[in-house]
Image: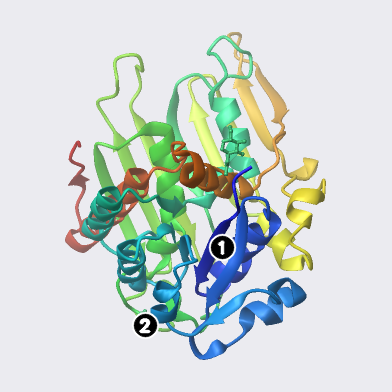
Amino acid sequence: MSTPIKTCVLGTGLGGLVFHIPFLLALPHLFTLYAVLEPSRSSKARARWGSKMDAVKIYESMEEVLADEVIELVVVTTPNETHHGLARRALEAGKHVMVDKPVTAAAQQARELAELAKSRNLVLAAYQNRRFEADWFALRSLLSLPMTSPQSLGHVYEFESRHDRYRTFLKGTWKDRAAPGTGLVYDLGSHLIDQALVLFGRPTKITAFIQNVRGIGDPNVDDCFTIYFHYTPFPPNRPHSLTVILRSHILSVSAPQLRWVVRGTQGTYTKYGSDGQEGHIRAMSDPAQITENEEYGKEHEGMWGTLENLREDGEVVTSTWPTEKKGSYTGLYVNVANAIRNGTQLMVKWEEATAVIEMIELAYLSQKEGRTVDVTRT
Ligand SMILES: *[C@@H]1O[C@H](CO)[C@@H](O)[C@H](O)[C@H]1NC(C)=O
Ligand SMILES: CC(=O)N[C@H]1CO[C@H](CO)[C@@H](O)[C@@H]1O
């Protein structure tokens, strides 16, 4: 057994408190939560996780973090445009780095970090955690069915992925203010774009409609988007072109919210509701429940998706597609530990997270110029 990785979390906003600190605490054989950076020692981490934080150092400045040679891994979950600078300084200090999504405000910054990490032989990981959710696993298992299966969707020609919410107010955090890396496209869009790229690769063209629909706060901060990825011409083994529709609407009153509509030549899959991990963590007092509670990451049967398959005689057969595998963001952390200690490949590649930022930049270009933009091949 290797020794646990001494880790420092930068930032104790929603990201730090819900998406990082509990997972580090839940995996004590792989990680030691050694320190957190909390400007002005706000002690939000202590207030939230209580005695679990007793042995954890609270640092007030990045200089203290960099000067502490014991720290091996730095997790960056701070506001917007600070990601690049903090990640760079941590890498220069010889520390492995994991950056929350969106990894940087500009793709060029992400590429610079990759070069730096490579030259220092350090692990640079991206927290695209939604690849470790139950609904994602269910979708992937459905799309991996052979065409001959009666439940196969056939050739997928339209893929709609949504993350809507109903929020009429501003949250009063940095996310409401105009700055590089803020707005809903960077925030939730980075998840939807990442998943689309994993499934289908880079599109040929992008058309984006990005708005501020609530008319509150800074008008330059978007709170609603529809982004089209066009895939055409399609590889020869697929006779149909594909349209991917990525949407996030801040004034969507539907409950539960629509998650996926996947249309293929042999059927349609419709799924409502999203992974419950965030809710579980918010309600939890002891992070050990993430690994110990059987119910963690499990999707209630009532939320399973619906399949409508077309038979050759024109009949439509309706069935339920089960969300069998539980979601858990621990999968991402286990992989990062393995990468640091054993040199294992990262499941979320930094280049993939960089491609997400490239697509976001093209989406904003499309919106600004009111046109469909080409995506260059790499
Ligand atoms: C590294 O690999 C060894 C041997 O496969 C395994 O036992 C260990 O758990 C791995 N370490 C991490 C941190 O994943
Ligand atoms: C330090 C920091 O958090 N960076 C910036 C994030 O965005 C706000 C405005 O939205 C800036 O004021 C911060 O400087």
* Contact between labelled residues 2 and 1, with CB atoms less than 8 Å apart: no
Is residue 79 in sight in this rendering? no
**314 in relation to 100, above or below:** above
Instruction: Look at the numbered disc 1 and give the secondary structure of its residue.
Output: loop
Q: Which residue is the site of mark 1? A: 252
- The image quarter containing residue 24 is bottom right
Q: Where the C terminus falls, by quadrant? A: top left
Label 2 CA crowd tier, 10 Å (few <14, some 14–19, many 20+): few
Q: Which residue type does callout 2 highlight? A: Asp
x then y, percent, for residue 246: 43, 49
x then y, percent, for residue 132: 58, 44
x then y, percent, for residue 142: 59, 27
Q: Which residue is the site of mark 2? A: 218
Between 167 and 353, the one lying in front of the other is 353
Label 1 CA crowd tier, 10 Å (few <14, some 14–19, many 20+): some
Query: Which residue sits at x=17%, y=40%?
Result: 376
- Res 115 label: none
x then y, percent, for residue 67: 40, 75
Query: Which residue sits at x=28%, y=57%?
Result: 113
Query: Which residue sits at x=57%, y=19%?
Result: 145
